[in-house]
């Protein structure tokens, strides 16, 4: 069974996000070993400088690296990533599960995204949309797309 990890910067606080994620965690238990790691978002002043943001992102990247399982295939969610359809993501997931991927790790940054160095380490850069979403909502959307991907792979009617 494929091991899927979500490493997320920022803790879910809103009940509706927690409940939505919980539903997809439950659904995904039949398809993969899912691990969700929440890392604290670095505190910044109200109007941080670019240098302060970069330093915070670098510290967050170090915290992410410390949580990576060995032999991980990284997927970084970032605005400059490639837009993919649900079917394309399902094909990638299927390829990963059939090949050498022991741990498929999706990275979701905090409100300032991910440090360029961690994005450079990613096997795939994935964009959810050219629109901007709260990173907590991106977690729900990603969990749904991973679930949808598994349903597509099995040929279910979930994906119409």
Image: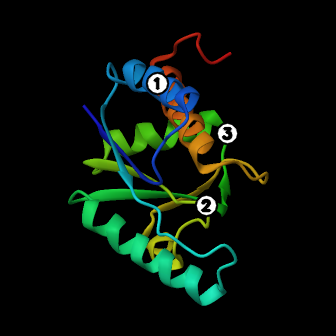
Mark closer to the chain start, 3 or 1:
1
Residue at image coords 60%, 36%: 141
Would you say 102 lies left or right of 73 here?
left
For the residues marked 2 and 3, what is the alpha-carbon distance in whole angstroms?
24 Å
Relative to the observer, which residue lies in front, 35 or 76? 35
Outermost residue, left side? 70
Outermost residue, bottom side? 51
Residue 73 x/y as whole percent? 36, 57
Q: Secondary structure at mark 3?
A: loop
Residue at image coords 61%, 67%: 112
Relative to the observer, which residue lies in front, 103 or 11? 11
Q: Residues within 10 Å of mark 3 (few under 14, many from 20)?
A: few
Residue 41 x/y as whole percent? 47, 62
Outermost residue, front side? 46
> Closer to the observer: label 3 or label 1?
1
Q: Quadrant of the C terminus?
A: top right
Q: Residues within 10 Å of mark 2 (few under 14, many from 20)?
A: some
Mark closer to the chain start, 2 or 3:
3
Q: Quadrant of residue 22?
A: top left
The numbered mark at residue 43 is none
Q: How many marks?
A: 3
For the residues marked 3 and 1, what is the alpha-carbon distance in whole angstroms?
19 Å
Relative to the observer, which residue lies in front, 151 or 69? 69
Residue at image coords 31%, 46%: 99
Residue of label 3: 85
Location of residue 53 with respect to 156 vertically, above or below: below
Relative to the observer, which residue lies in front, 120 or 91? 120
Residue 18 x/y as whole percent? 48, 30
Q: Residues within 10 Å of mark 1 (few under 14, many from 20)?
A: some
Residue of label 1: 24
Residue of label 2: 111
């Amino acid at each position: 069974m494929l091991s899927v990890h979500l490493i997320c910067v920022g803790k879910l606080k809103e009940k509706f996000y927690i409940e939505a994620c919980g539903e997809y965690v439950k659904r995904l238990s039949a398809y993969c070993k899912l691990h969700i790691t929440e890392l604290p978002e670095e505190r910044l002043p109200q109007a941080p400088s670019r240098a302060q943001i970069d330093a915070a992102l670098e510290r967050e990247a170090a915290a992410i690296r410390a949580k990576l399982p060995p032999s991980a295939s990284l997927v970084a969610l970032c605005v400059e990533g490639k837009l993919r359809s649900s079917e394309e993501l399902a094909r990638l997931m299927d390829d990963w599960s059939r090949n050498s991927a022991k741990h498929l790790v999706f990275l979701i940054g905090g409100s300032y995204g991910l440090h360029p160095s961690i994005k450079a380490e990613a096997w795939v850069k994935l964009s959810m949309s050219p629109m901007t979403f709260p990173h907590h909502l991106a977690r729900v959307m990603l969990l749904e797309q991973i679930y949808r991907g598994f349903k597509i792979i099995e040929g279910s009617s979930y994906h119409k």
